[in-house]
Amino acid sequence: MERVLITGAAGFLGSHLCDKFINEGFQVIGMDNFITGDKKNISHLLSNPHFQFIEHDVTEFVKIDGPLDYILHFASPASPIDYLKIPIQTLKVGSLGTHNLLGLAKAKNARILIASTSEVYGDPLVHPQNEEYYGNVNTIGPRGVYDEAKRFQESITMAYHRFHGVETRIVRIFNTYGPRMRLNDGRVIPAFMGQALRGEDLTVFGDGSQTRSFCYVSDEVDGIYKLLFSNYSYPVNIGNPHEITIKDFAEEIINLTGTNQKVIYKDLPKDDPMQRQPDISLAKKLLNWEPKINRQEGMLKTYNYFKELTEEELYKSEHKDFSKHIKK
């Protein structure tokens, strides 16, 4: 059996990738330090003989015994609430963590896929965003810790590809949603779902004219899987190109949940992008990939998942405690 290391394995997307590779017949090594991940996301895999879990921070040296065929680097805070609370850890996992894993890929002669993001485009001046666009990023703004960590991650990955001949793949992930998202992670879908389930008004930042494009997790995972086994080393957008304004999306959530909350408006956070829509022409051409799950179907599945949460989970503190991960 081929062996794959998946970092960030206890996270939302990482845990679904573990499922995918197990189902495809791989021996999966999951790695996470639980800074934002949750052990319950992989609890169903812990007794599987084809799954091994290692609790480890990838910003420290990464050692894997035996052969290794593939590495998927998905360890990183991915929500503004998280990376604004742990900015240094966010920068370190994108830089030191990526460096460690690229070194491991070189040593093991393994192919590595790194998880980049649509945030490399910043607040884009090109719409929709294609892979040739270099972005409009505020390097010293509050979101810069995430944006620049991912941009550096892409740069060092290409350096290892060109200088050391490491087989590399880069996926630029756009907004993804589905079961196992943290209800309190601050992103718009769990935020709206949580507010609706608690009977609270839905909070829209700015005037709601900013747009997002939401991709259901099974489609995202399928695109990532196909990219790993392609022959393309440069970044590829994987996301859903169907765009919607946040204001209209809030109304969709109210209709979906059957609640009668109103929408309230607050100030837009600094450097929050006004437009997000992937140009997926390259993914269609290279991978024969495009999303299959429409937003109505995906949102219903996601809402049903959140409805099953306990009352304690629904009302617990907004912020995760990061204190044990922060070095004094």
Image (cartoon, grey):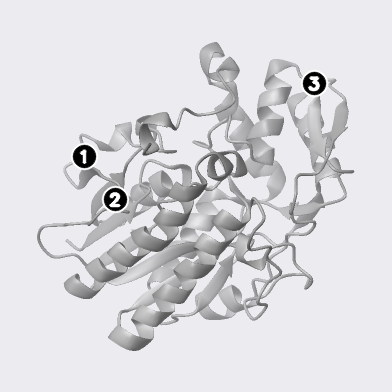
Q: Which residue is mark 2?
A: 22
Residue at the outermost front position: 328
260 sits left or right of 228 in the view: right
Give the residue displayed 60% in from the left and 28% down from the top.
304
Contact (Cβ within 8 Å) of mark 2 with mark 1: yes
140 or 268, which lies in front?
140
Q: Residues within 10 Å of mark 3 (few under 14, many from 20)?
A: some
In the picture, the disc for residue 48 is: 1
Depicted 291 relative to depicted 134: above or below:
above
Which SS class for mark 2?
Answer: helix
In the picture, the disc for residue 259 is: 3
Q: Quadrant of the C terminus?
A: top left
228 sits left or right of 200 in the view: left
Which SS class for mark 1?
Answer: loop
Q: Quadrant of the N terminus?
A: bottom left
Q: Which comes before the other along the chain, label 2 or label 1? A: 2
Give the residue displayed 78% in from the left and 59% down from the top.
275
Distance of mark 2 from mark 3, alpha carbons?
39 Å
Q: Residues within 10 Å of mark 2 (few under 14, many from 20)?
A: some
Q: Residues within 10 Å of mark 1 (few under 14, many from 20)?
A: few
276 or 283, which lies in front?
276
Residue 77 location (% of width, % of height): 49, 46
Contact (Cβ within 8 Å) of mark 2 with mark 3: no
Q: Which comes before the other along the chain, label 1 or label 3? A: 1
Amino acid type, label 2: Ile
Q: Residue 288: in sight, yes or no?
A: no
Residue at the outermost top position: 311
Amino acid type, label 1: Asn
Residue 145 location (% of width, % of height): 56, 55
